Amino acid sequence: QAKARGRNGYRFYAPSMTGEGVERLRLETFLRRSLEKNEMFLNYQPQVEIDTGRLVGVEALVRWNHPELGLVPPARFIPLAEDSGFINQLGKWVLDEACRQMMRWQAQGLHVPKMAVNLSVKQFERGSIAGMVADILKETGLEPQRLQLEVTESVIMNTGDALGFINDLHAIGVGLAIDDFGTGYSSLAYLKQLPVQTLKIDRSFIKDISTDVNDEAIAIAIIQLGKSMQLSVIAEGVETEEQAAFLLRHGCKLAQGYFYSRPVLAQDMLERWIDH
Ligand code: C2E
Ligand code: MG
Ligand code: MG
Ligand code: MG
């Protein structure tokens, strides 16, 4: 089994030489028990205003640290969780923990304006999730406007009644963002009907923004689209000052990425962002 120690001291999970099917089954078995064993935790990645560096929000990103496997990346376990239905439990846990964390920071003197949480397509397929979200908001006491739910373009396009679910969520007052924007196939006519407030430019377009003319054109088009539809636009995966400067020059005010901060533990947010 290939394992390497990351710079934060975690071992990183990599698939072993056994068959993919066996591996999958093993992962699925471990995954089912991960919550009761407290193996899941959240990282938070700051979202900032480019020209001032001001913190405008954080995105919650789930992490799974298994005692044998090490740190398993979400790209590996989220699809499994979706296939097995475990995502409903996990998604609820993430949302609850993220909302609680907002209240903890608040009590510790750190005001984080907004918490962004990712939703999976499977959470929509089960029926309206607005009730679940409303319950968690009520239990934790977080104001709905301070929660932003991220759904990918493909989720919206591939869910039968996406518009209905999104309207239900909008009705309880939470914000909605379209994640990985530009990678799916949403029609503009459809987009216009959705009560979303934010577009997140996919990081694949940001990567070579100042060298690849196509990526540059796409990023600029998304920024313009956001402007004309009065949506806020945030670029994800910003790794360099050059990319940030490009975005600002073209009217994109918000960014998230390693240039500002990697996803970090709640405690690190406190140390880095609280006013002393
Ligand atoms: P996403 O929602 O698009 O999240 C952004 C991903 O980009 C995160 O990967 C983040 O760590 C990474 N990232 C942020 N800044 C940079 C950068 O500057 N450069 C590069 N190369 N990468 C950057 P992560 O945490 O591995 O998550 C991957 C995906 O897994 C997420 O993509 C999201 O779709 C999914 N995911 C994560 N947490 C959850 C969750 O709680 N629920 C659900 N349903 N999905 C989740
Ligand atoms: Mg996201
Ligand atoms: Mg994204
Ligand atoms: Mg992405």
Image (cartoon, grey):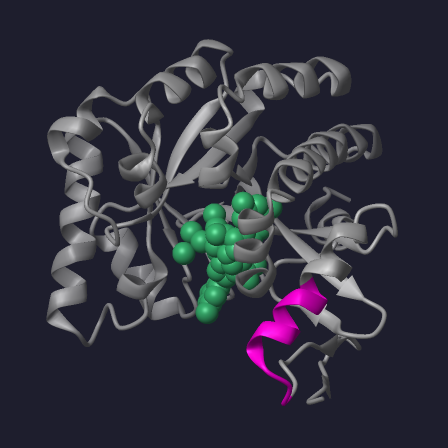
In the depicted structure, whether residue 194 falls above or below residue 155: above
Mark yes or no: residue 60 visible.
no
- Viewer-nearest residue: 176 or 54: 176
Viewer-proximal residue, 204 or 33?
33
Q: Quadrant of residue 229?
A: top left
- Quarter location, residue 189: top left
Decide whether the magenta segment is chiefly helix, strand or loop: helix
Q: Is residue 99 above or below residue 64?
A: above
> What residue do we see at 62% from left, 36% from top?
88
Does the magenta-highlighted stretch encompass residue 22? yes
Q: Residue at the location (74% across, 55% down)?
A: 265
Q: Position of residue 184 (x, y in %)?
A: 25, 49
Question: Image quarter for residue 243?
Answer: bottom left
Residue occupying the point 22% across, 36% down:
226
> Residue 150, how many percent across, how many down?
45, 38
- Lateral position of residue 38 relative to residue 269, left or right: right
Given residues 192 and 8, the one toward you in this image is 192
Q: Is residue 177 left or right of residue 59?
A: left
- The quadrant of the rendering that contains the N terminus is bottom right
> Residue 191: in sight, yes or no?
yes
The region drawn magenta spans 17-27
* Residue at 32%, 70% in the rendered image: 207
Q: Is residue 10 magenta?
A: no
State the quadrant of the C terminus: top right
On the picture, is 264 further left or further right than 198?
A: right
How far from the left and from the top, in percent, is residue 91?
Answer: 62, 38
For ligand 4, the image quadrant comes to: bottom left
**Residue 257 on image: x %, y %:** 48, 60
